[in-house]
Amino acid sequence: MVAVGYTLMCEQTGPRELVDHGQRAEGAGFDFEVISDHYYPWLDSQGHSPYAWSVLGAVAHTTSRVDLMSFVTCPIRRYHPAVVAQKAATLGLMSQGRFTLGVGAGENLNEHVVGAWPHVQQRHDMLEEALQIMRSLLDGETVTYSGEYYDVPEAYLWDRPAGGVPIAVAASGPSSSALAAEYGDGLIAADPDARVVDLFDQAGGEGKPRFGQVPVCWGPDEGECRKRVVDQWRWAPPDWKVKAELPGPDSFASASQFVREEDLVRIVPCGPDVEQHVEAFNRYVDAGFTHVALVQVGGESQPEFLDWAERELVPRLRG
């Protein structure tokens, strides 16, 4: 059975509310929870961006069953990979083994706050070095590392789960899928693309978990849901190669100003009809994903969404 997840979307909700939503999502029957790790929201209208790792610690402490995951953390600029490994090990202990470290090559939006944004090939090379460092530390090794981008004179994680922490790696093409298969315990992909799953399997990832995320906008009034999606989710359709380079919310506002409502509702189901939300979820199932996290568009709508999901959506997704 495909695991049903819930997204703690930091770009649209404050930290205390996120912790409340994490607790409520566990009670609503979700199997796992993922959290975005941003410094900026995509758009000003989303209005939030708290520190994801503080929220994760609180959610780990106030839940007992759901698995938790960063979705995703970039360990190449804003965070040094040795520090990411320490954070992940601590979360692994606080959650009693429920945490998966999800990582990717990041976006300029969040990483430029500490310096210049590297070009794409450099970013991928940096991610590989970061994965080597984090993998070794989480496996309990004392690490001494000297690479092209990172130096670790000596590091050891004194507090970590005995079994380590699983790592899932975001991928979108052949090279990133190969990297995910080599260093990761799972795959993360943004779209319901069976091609990426196949590339991951062919590179040695067969049998490992595949994590996806599907946006939905539930509400009793479809028209209001459509307006909300245009206001807060119009950043999504541009190609990822474009999104990775834009430096701030103003840039995303400019890049998405001509995105049409009819284009958005093709990728984000809107309104009260449970069947269209199930259909969107099943696109990932059909593409071969084993874990699919729902993200409800609109921070203020989360409590009502979670009540509805418990009554109607989660039972339907479990068939």
Image: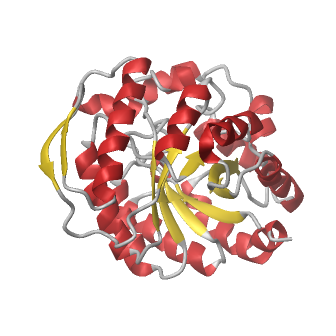
Q: Nearer the viewer, residue 75 or 236?
A: 75
Q: Residue 66, percent across and down? A: 55, 74
Which residue is painted at 85% across and 61% down in the image?
Answer: 274
Residue furthest out toward the left: 153
Q: Is residue 45 visible?
A: yes
- Percent x, y for residue 10? 45, 52
Residue 268 drawn above or below residue 219: above
Identify whether 177 is placed above or below 306: above
Depth check, front residue: 243 or 190: 190
Q: Is residue 214 left or right of residue 24?
A: right
- Quarter of the image for residue 140 reads bottom left
Colouring: secondary structure
Locate residue 37 relative to residue 222 in the image: left or right: left
Q: Note whether 274 is above or below 60 in the view shown.
A: above
In percent of width and height, residue 152 lies at: 16, 42
**Quadrant of image for the N terminus:** bottom right
Image quadrant where one finds the C terminus: bottom right
